[in-house]
Image (cartoon, rainbow, N blue to C red):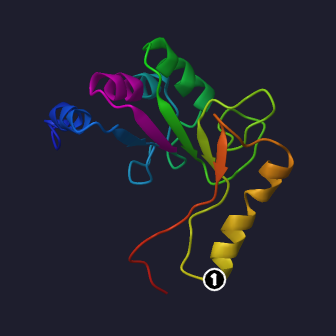
Amino acid sequence: THRFSQMAVLVDKIHQLGLRAGWYLNGCECGEKVERLINYEGDIRSLHGLGFDEVKFDGCGKQRNLTLYALLMQRTGKNYTIENCHWGKCTESDDSACPTNDWCPFNTFRTSGDIRPTYGAVLSNLLSAEPFNRANLTGPGCWAYPDMLELGVTL
């Protein structure tokens, strides 16, 4: 936080404007190589301490257990909006990007990989949400979405 020592002040300003503030965790630039409970706890302690309302979990680092993250957030007493950005990878583990009929510890989940600046990529990403629609695994409280608009990217 030395780079953004006034982050809580910024979040307060966002709230004064009547907006919600979100944070991005497990980003690709961090590159954590080992999963550690202390990292999960520190992420949520910072998220809560700085006053954020929403969080986007990417899938690059080793902290990908969304059930654990949801439990730690629940323990704070605050209701967070959670976005799972694990690129549509369905697994049997708690780092899955895909809900089941009785498991969805996130509000939105991405069904595709990163968008690319081609027509085929746009169609492929849009179609990636269809299996979740057919299986009734998307709806209020657990929405499926494909990666969408990305500005400034060219072939």
In x, y percent, where is residue 122? 63, 74
In x, y percent, where is residue 10? 18, 38
In-image side of 85 versus 43 (left or right): right
- Rendered residue at 42%/14% (across/down): 76
- Rendered residue at 49%/33% (across/down): 81
In the figure, residue 77 lies in which quadrant?
A: top left
Q: Considering only vertical position in the picture, is 114 above or below 145?
A: below
In-image side of 140 versus 19 (left or right): right
Magenta segment includes 50? yes
Q: Nearer the viewer, residue 38 or 145?
A: 145
In-image side of 4 versus 149 (left or right): left
In x, y percent, where is residue 12? 20, 31
In the figure, residue 94 lies in which quadrant?
A: top right
Element class at badge 1: helix
Q: Nearer the viewer, residue 142 or 97?
A: 142
- Rendered residue at 41%/25% (across/down): 44
Q: Which residue is mark 1?
A: 119
In-image side of 58 versus 146 (left or right): left
Q: Which residues are magenta?
A: 42-57
Extreme residue in the bottom direction: 155
Q: Nearer the viewer, residue 52 or 88?
A: 52
- Rendered residue at 43%/78% (across/down): 153
How many C-alpha atoms fall within 10 Å of the one at disc 1: few (<14), some, or many (≥20)? few
Amino acid found under the numbered disc labelled 1: Tyr
Q: Nearer the viewer, residue 140 or 34?
A: 140
Total marks shown come to: 1
Q: Considering only vertical position in the picture, is 92 above or below 110?
A: above
Magenta segment includes 105? no
Q: Quarter holding the N terminus?
A: top left
Q: Considering only vertical position in the picture, is 95 above or below 105?
A: below
In x, y percent, where is residue 73? 48, 21
